[in-house]
Image (spheres, helix red, strand yellow):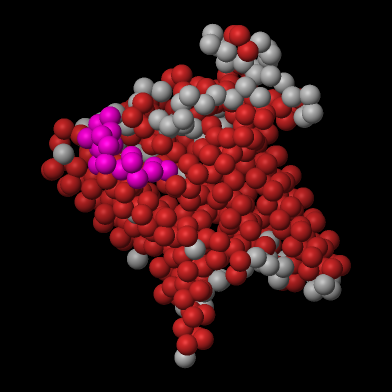
Amino acid sequence: MGVLYTLFAAGVIQLVLLPGLFPAWVTHGGLLKYTDSVAYHNMAVAIVQDIEAHGWSAWELAPKSQFSVGFTAIFYALFTPEPWVMLPVKAAAHALCFAILYHIASHWLPDWRLAVLCACPYLLFPSSAFWYSQLLKDGYFNAGIMLFVLGWFYLARTRTWFNGGAKIIAWIALILAGYLLMSLVRTYMFAVLFFLCLLLAAIAAVFGLLANRKRQLPVRGVVLMVASLAVVLAGTVLIRQGLIEIGYVNTHTINVESRFKRLTTDPARAHLKPYWEPSDWLPEELDKRFATLAGVRDGYVTSSKNPKSSIDTDVRFHRVSDIVAYLPRAVQIALLAPFPDMWLGQGSTGATTMMRRVSMLEMSATYVALLFLPVAVWIWRRRGEMWVVLSAGLSIMILYAVTTPNIGTLYRVRYGYIMLLITLGLAGACALLTRYRNTTK
């Protein structure tokens, strides 16, 4: 059902609605101007031409570090180099995310209809049409998020360590598949995902050991848990090293890190170039990670060509304490932006202005769902899988809010993560309503 709905919606938007009602916004094939879709299409067509001239040896996995381009080129070469060829693939990726969110919600709610309701925002929010009707990479990345979280969801459940065997292997495979897909789509996520793995492994270990303390988990289960978590972490390291060795790297990340090899503590030079004051209480490598975050944010601020969608551009980080002090504001932006005062403003293009109107509807629904997030946390506070969903969604969103002072970009890249929280919040609302009904019967 999810695939058919998404395929129909994408086809109508790309082939009928945009060319028919907004011809000035699109190029050939219904691709929006001034977006990466046009560039990705042209790159994929060029690869197809090389394949026709020189054979499949001319195909590249990720030309210019763009996995979605190489992936699109496969279908262009097998069928025809037209954007509509990718509609079924993108519909399948979108529906997969919906199915996983439904699967997660169904573990908390006995009524499958309520579980469908909790997952529906991912499927139905209009902003998602921006990538499932275009040649953008967000749909693939979101699929990676959901596979990754679903694997950890099961590894954090105490009962997993009683089952053993093939099921645990399947959960590990899901985590590594999601990690690989996210790393291919956005290589700058390498280090971030590894630290997220450490966080989620800690959650799984804590709840497993608590169960063992209560004599709910045998020693064999503890050993299996430790071994499984070690395999996951080792697998992520091997994937990362393998992709680095074949040259699949993100030059932006490398450039940002190299900017901070020569750190300076001279505040007087702040107006001339970014500077960073090293911390005397953190390990140098960890301090460098914080400096990198400051560099990423500085890069966004200095290169931004769209001030209408920017926020807090006056905020720069010069030391770890600056980042820590900004965290409450980052949480606010991560969860609640774009704020109501941005909904009716004008964007840089007609399409972005329309997206502001769309965000008004989506954020209103998001606010309602997030109101019940504390309820969900309280109801399922003793279940490790709830903490996996909450941590995976919230931590990365905060990181994006710290480094990305552009609401348009943030709105798109956080979609998969905030949908985890929306699903959790709606599940909490449904559980609360169910309990109320049961007590009033």
Q: Quadrant of residue 140?
A: top left
The span shown in magenta is 337-355
Residue drawn at (27%, 45%), measured in percent from left and top? 357
- x and y percent of residue 147 in the render? 55, 54
Please say if 348 is above or below 164: above
381 horizontally vs 147: left or right: right
Q: Is residue 348 magenta?
A: yes
- x and y percent of residue 257 in the render? 63, 21
Please say if 413 is above or below 107: above
Residue drawn at (56%, 71%), measured in percent from left and top? 107
- x and y percent of residue 370 in the render? 47, 57
Q: Is residue 215 visible?
A: yes
Residue placed furthest toward the right: 219
User: 268 or 261: nearer the eye?
Assistant: 268
User: 76 or 312: nearer the eye?
Assistant: 312
351 horizontally vs 298: left or right: left
Residue drawn at (47%, 35%), measured in percent from left and top? 67
Please state, as top left, top right, bottom left or bottom right, where the N terminus lies in the image. Answer: bottom left
Residue drawn at (46%, 26%), measured in percent from left and top? 313
Q: Is residue 245 visible?
A: no
How many numbered marks appear?
0
User: 88 or 397: nearer the eye?
Assistant: 397
Q: Quadrant of residue 150?
A: bottom right
Residue placed furthest toward the bottom: 441
- x and y percent of residue 95 in the render? 40, 58
Q: Quadrant of residue 327?
A: top right
